[in-house]
Structure formats: C-alpha cells, structure tokens
C-alpha cells in the first residue's frame, strides 16, 4: 500500500546552530518542503539581520546536502527589548512569525517574556505587518501539569485585544487547550506534535524514566492524547502539524539535568501515517501536514509530493549523536 500527499510543512522545528545545524537540516529537508524554524538558538534570532543570516546558513547546508528545494520559514524571538520597528524591519526582510517564550519556560528561554502587556505595541505592529504570533503556551512556576491550562487566559486576552493578529498556540497538549482554540475566532489556531499523539506522562515517568520522551510541555493524560488525536484527524483547519522536533545530544538528555525536547524529524511522517491509519483517517493526513498550516500561514504549496509506503523499517538507535523518537522500534510506514 502506498500513499502520495502534497509535500508537507513542518510549522515548528528546532534546527539549532553551529555543528548541530549542519547535522540537522537534512533530517527535516528530506521530507518537508517548508519548515518554520524556531529562533531559540544559543545566540537567539532577534532581528531581521539575524534571521537573514540564519536563513542563508540553512540554505547553504541544504544545498550541500543536495536538498536545495527546502525553504526555511523564518521567525524572530520576542523579548523585552523587541520594538515595533524591529518587527517592521523583520517583516520587510521576509520573517513571517514572532515567537514568544514566557521567561524560563523551556530550552534557551532565560531571555523570555515576563510581562505580556508590555509587548502589546509589538503585537500591534505584528498585526499591521500581518506577522504571525507563535506562543509557547505555558506559565512557568505553576505546577507542571497545569502550566498550559494556566496560559489559556493570556491567549484569550491577546486574541481579544488583537482580533486581526494571527496567533498559533504551539504544541498543544491538553483537551482544555484544544477546546479553547476551537471556541476562539479564526485568527487563532494550534500546532500539534507527533510525540504528543503517541505518548502520555505515563510513558515518560510511569515506568522507567525515559528522558528521550521528556519535552515541554510534558505529555499529559490519555484523555488529553485522545483529544489531540481527535483534533489532528478531524476536519477543523485550525489544527496542523508543528513537530517541535527538538534535538539534544544524547549526553544532554541522559544526565542529571536533562534537556527538554523530543527529536522526531526523521520519523515524523512515518509515525503520522501509522496513527492516521489506526484511526481510519489516512485521507486526512494531507490536510493536517500539507494544507491547513500552509493556508493559515498564507504560503504557496509544494514543492511536489511525498510518498509513503506500508513497509516495515527499524528506526536507528541514533542520528548524528541524537536519539530519535521511537529509536529501535519497527514502524509500519516508511517514507519513500
Ligand atoms: C524545545 C527545544 O529544545 O528547543 N524543547 C521542548 O521541550 N519542546 C523548546 C520548546 O519548543 O519548548
Ligand atoms: Zn519548540
């Protein structure tokens, strides 16, 4: 059995910088035609110039890997010092989104935001420039399982204050977040990762500790997972793929203070085919991976298609020093 879909978009990925970037570009560009690249690199992407330089570097690596058709979609990180002028210049330079991390919420977010209202002039400029606001929707300091729910009021406040600002609640993990997004106007949508469709907190810490499943936001309950599956395979265009593939070297995961992030890039499409098939929804895979996010971001289609075949393969134990999601497991679907 084979399926062919329009080339997918990954609307949330961490490609990192330095040596890691050189290793990671191919894992995303092999399957995805476009990817929204997160700005939480060690030296953050804060301005038009940063984003342009980062984009050039990604494209240079993709060309070396013989994957020149890959288009990185650029973001800037919104921090306390971001100004409306920075937003306008970034937009002119082709940056399509600004990413807001609450202070200290996840990897490389010590420079994140603690006072959202102080950024309202920045949101105003984003609304004017038609730049998308991407939100890491968790409140740091709150009990870890309640952090996403605690953020929803902020999402509602921002979406009411800026009715024409397109907002993405990133990597939703709870039924409550899914329901909240459904009730908000059409300028608000959400990304769903691959790993959150497969795992609950039980998989992370319920038996042996599995550090390679540890990410922010942490996976929640079985009820939450089912709500995410419902949203992904459903017909609402508000929910689309953002893998949040977040590579960390094995030593940074298997240690006493392990980094948050699950590396899914090489297995994301195969895993999605598996779960969409399980739920009798293979015909909806293309919407979730290739259409809905693209339409929300107002991007052109393509390039070309991606074919998957039902043919078992074993996920390698490691890719370039990073342990992937489902390492060592046999997956039923394979990207051709
Ligand atoms: C991401 C990373 O490692 O950059 N980690 C994660 O757990 N998802 C950052 C993020 O998106 O939170
Ligand atoms: Zn992320």
Image (cartoon, grey):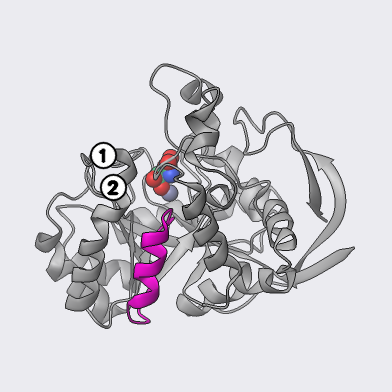
Instruction: Mark yes or no: residue 96 visible.
Output: no
Relative to residue 254, is residue 121 depicted above or below?
below
At horizontal 12% and vertical 54% (from top left) the residue drawn is 115
Q: Quadrant of the N terminus?
A: bottom right
Label 2 crowd (10 A; few <14 / some 14-19 / many >=20)? some
- Give the Cα separation between the discs numbered 1 and 2: 6 Å
At horizontal 41% and vertical 55% (from top left) the residue drawn is 174
Q: Quadrant of the C terminus?
A: bottom right
Can you tell me which quadrant of the image ligand 1 is in?
A: top left
Q: Which mark is residue 66?
A: none
Do tag 1 and tag 2 residues touch (Cβ < 8 Å)? yes
Relative to residue 138, is residue 260 depicted above or below?
above
How many marks overall?
2
Q: Position of residue 333 (x, y in %)?
A: 80, 52
Label 1 crowd (10 A; few <14 / some 14-19 / many >=20)? few
Q: Which residue is mark 1?
A: 143
Side (left or right) of 246 relative to 174? right
Using the rendered view, name the quadrant where residue 264 is placed: top right
Is residue 207 found inside the magenta-colored segment of the image?
Answer: no
Relative to residue 330, is residue 117 depicted above or below?
below
User: What secondary structure is found at the residue carrying circle 1?
Assistant: loop
Q: Position of residue 121 (x, y in %)?
A: 13, 70
- Furthest toward the left, the residue is 118
At horizontal 51% and vertical 46% (from top left) the residue drawn is 15
Q: Which residues are magenta?
A: 170-188
Side (left or right) of 78 relative to 179? left
At horizontal 73% and vertical 53% (from top left) the residue drawn is 270
Give whichever of 205, 85 is nearer the camera: 205
Instruction: Mark yes or no: residue 49 visible.
Output: yes
Using the rendered view, name the quadrant where residue 160 is placed: bottom left
Q: Which residue is mark 2?
A: 147
Give whichever of 114, 149 is nearer the camera: 149
């Amino acid at each position: 059995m084979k399926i062919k879909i329009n080339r997918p978009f990954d609307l949330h990925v961490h490609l990192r910088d330095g040596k890691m970037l050189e290793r990671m570009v191919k894992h995303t560009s092999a399957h995805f035609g476009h990817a929204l690249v997160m700005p939480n690199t060690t030296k953050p992407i804060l301005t038009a110039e940063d984003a342009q330089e980062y984009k050039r570097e990604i494209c240079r690596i993709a060309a070396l890997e013989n994957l020149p058709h890959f288009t990185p979609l650029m973001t800037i990180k919104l921090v306390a010092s971001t100004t409306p002028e920075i937003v306008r210049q970034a937009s002119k330079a082709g940056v399509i989104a600004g990413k807001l991390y609450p202070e200290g919420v996840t990897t490389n977010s010590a420079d994140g935001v603690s006072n959202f209202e102080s950024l309202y002039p920045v949101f105003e400029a984003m609304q004017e420039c038609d730049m998308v606001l991407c939100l890491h929707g968790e409140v740091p300091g709150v009990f870890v399982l309640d952090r996403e729910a605690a953020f929803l009021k902020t999402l509602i406040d921002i979406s009411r204050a800026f009715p024409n600002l397109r907002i993405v609640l990133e990597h939703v993990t709870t039924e409550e977040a899914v329901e909240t997004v459904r009730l908000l106007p059409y300028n608000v949508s959400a990304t769903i990762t691959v790993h959150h469709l497969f795992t609950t907190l039980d998989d992370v810490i319920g038996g042996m500790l599995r550090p390679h499943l540890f990410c922010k936001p942490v996976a929640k309950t079985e009820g939450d997972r089912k709500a995410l599956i419902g949203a992904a395979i459903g017909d609402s265009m508000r929910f689309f793929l953002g893998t949040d593939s977040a590579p960390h070297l094995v030593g940074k995961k298997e240690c006493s203070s392990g980094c948050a992030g699950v590396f899914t890039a090489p297995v994301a499409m195969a895993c999605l085919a598996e779960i969409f098939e399980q739920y009798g929804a293979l015909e909806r895979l293309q919407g979730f991976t290739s259409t809905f996010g693209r339409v929300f971001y107002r991007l052109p289609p393509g390039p070309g298609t991606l074919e998957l075949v039902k043919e078992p393969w074993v996920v390698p134990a490691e890719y370039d020093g990073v342990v992937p999601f489902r390492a060592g497991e046999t997956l039923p679907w394979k990207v051709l």
